[in-house]
Image (tube, rainbow, N blue to C red):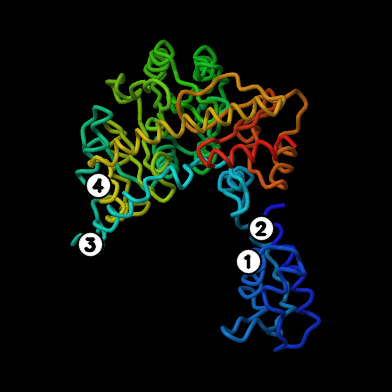
Amino acid sequence: MSKDNRSAEVADALRERAATMRPGDRLPPVRDLVQEFRASAATISHALAHLQAVGVLKAEPGRGTFVTGRNRLPEADYSWQSQALGRARVDIRRTTRLGAHGGPDDIQLSWGYLAAELQPIDDLRALGARAARSSHAWSMMPPTGLPDLRRAFAAEYHAEPGDVLVVPGGQQALVYAMRTLAEPGMAVVVESPTYPGAMIAAQSAGLELVAVPADGEGIRTDKLADALERTRATLLYLQPCYANPTGTVLPPARRQEILRLAAEHGAFVIEDDWARHLVIDGAPPPPLLTDDPDGHVVSITTLTKPVAPGMRVAAVIARGPAGERLRGARVADDMCVPAVLQETALGLLTSSAWPRHLKRLRSRLGERRDAMLSELHATGLRMRVAQVPTGGIHLWARLPEGTDTAALSRRAQEAGVLIGDGSQFFIDEPPAPFLRLSYATASIPQIAEGIRRFAQ
């Protein structure tokens, strides 16, 4: 059972106990509650903090935790809100899964970020401290981003610095690009399976999702042509490089066909290039944007994935009127990315720490990927990884027909292992049961223990 569920159970039990006590009565100390409920101190503290927040308990440092006498609060009536709010755009089931990082005792084989030991923490500390001492550390930055940082992002995409817009993270870049490039009610075509964050970004923008199946080489361009013709969609979302969750890389022939179809249908292609710096074997293909002279491709690149979850710095690269519209409307969102974060990102990208980090990351991701594959094979699990990824951070595994992946992921979480329910990566019903397993979020011993628990 997850820590959140357990702390909720403890909080409910303590709330019932407080209802039988008098105002001012003291609860037992945390160490006694740990033994009574057979829970960790963190779980007990979380439950107590919740009851303090709602006014049932009051903590007095050095004395203990006391009943306040507010055990029976009037029950709120929120029924009016359902009518006022109308229909929800975003599927809360996807947002809940997307943000689920578990508790400190869980083995994380699902999250889409690097484990702490893979992050360049020492470099970030030093660069962040230097950025914080800058005379303009807390000044307003240009809405489009620090000029030198825009230049650093542009170099890898053979773009002009003026084509670059700095935004706070890849997820916001997706929402911003989809909302700007299409009107509510229009269709956006996505490969299937795809990144759930792209789905909720499209929903947030009021767009209609249209799924096109993918195979071992990415989106099927024959099916894509049919979808564009049928829906008249002018927006296509793709991950040409180490796609999440499958790890596929678009081959040259399909890249050219996608650009041809985009030109024929007057469509934009959002290139989510999140995994370019997470290469393991060989080299990644060039960005799709570099083969597009006419501004059909809008590229998104991020530092959050290859650096650290808190490095919320990304870039949207777009040419022509679309780029002008994206950059011109920037202030409607949040004015700018904080100067300290931009200066830290610039310091990392322009120092020797960046290639050193990428070289180390390449090696360690390869070790973890191979360790996870070895553990899956050793346990004899009836799972098939059809394609070993050459980059990225995920394995995409097919399970036997009839497997309930939602129930399986819940049972795994009860055993303290977080895995990705494959059904979350499809817009409609999945064609087969799949799981996504992330090898970048745990150490090699944790991967071994997590797979062992999962197998049991």
Residue annotated with mark 2? 4
Q: Which residue appears at 78% of the width and 26% of the height?
A: 402
What is the C-alpha distance between the residues marked 4 and 1?
38 Å
Specify whether 316 is left or right of 396.
Answer: left
Specify whether 14 is left or right of 94.
Answer: right
Specify whether 330 is left or right of 203.
Answer: left
Badge 3 or badge 4: first in the primary sequence: 3
Tell how many labels.
4
Task: Indicate the amino acid at tag 1.
Answer: His
Instruction: Check disc 2 and report its element: helix, strand or loop.
Output: helix
Task: Indicate the amino acid at tag 2.
Answer: Asp
| Residue 288 in picture, x, y percent from top left | 35, 23
The tag on residue 46 is 1
Q: Closest to the observer: 244 or 295?
A: 244
Q: Closest to the observer: 410 or 81?
A: 410
The tag on residue 347 is 4
Instruction: Check disc 1 and report its element: helix, strand or loop.
Output: helix
Q: Which residue appears at 78% of the width and 79% of the height?
A: 19
Q: Tell me: residue 291, above or below residue 73.
A: above
Residue sitting farthest toward the right? 20
Task: Indicate the amino acid at tag 3.
Answer: Arg
Could you say which quadrant of the image residue 48 lies in? bottom right
What is the C-alpha distance between the residues marked 1 and 3?
36 Å
* Quadrant of the frame with the C terminus: top right
Q: Tell me: residue 400, above or below residue 87.
A: above
What is the C-alpha distance between the residues marked 3 and 4?
13 Å
| Residue 427 in picture, x, y percent from top left | 61, 31
Mark 2 burial class by Cα count in 10 Å: few <14, some 14-19, many 20+: few
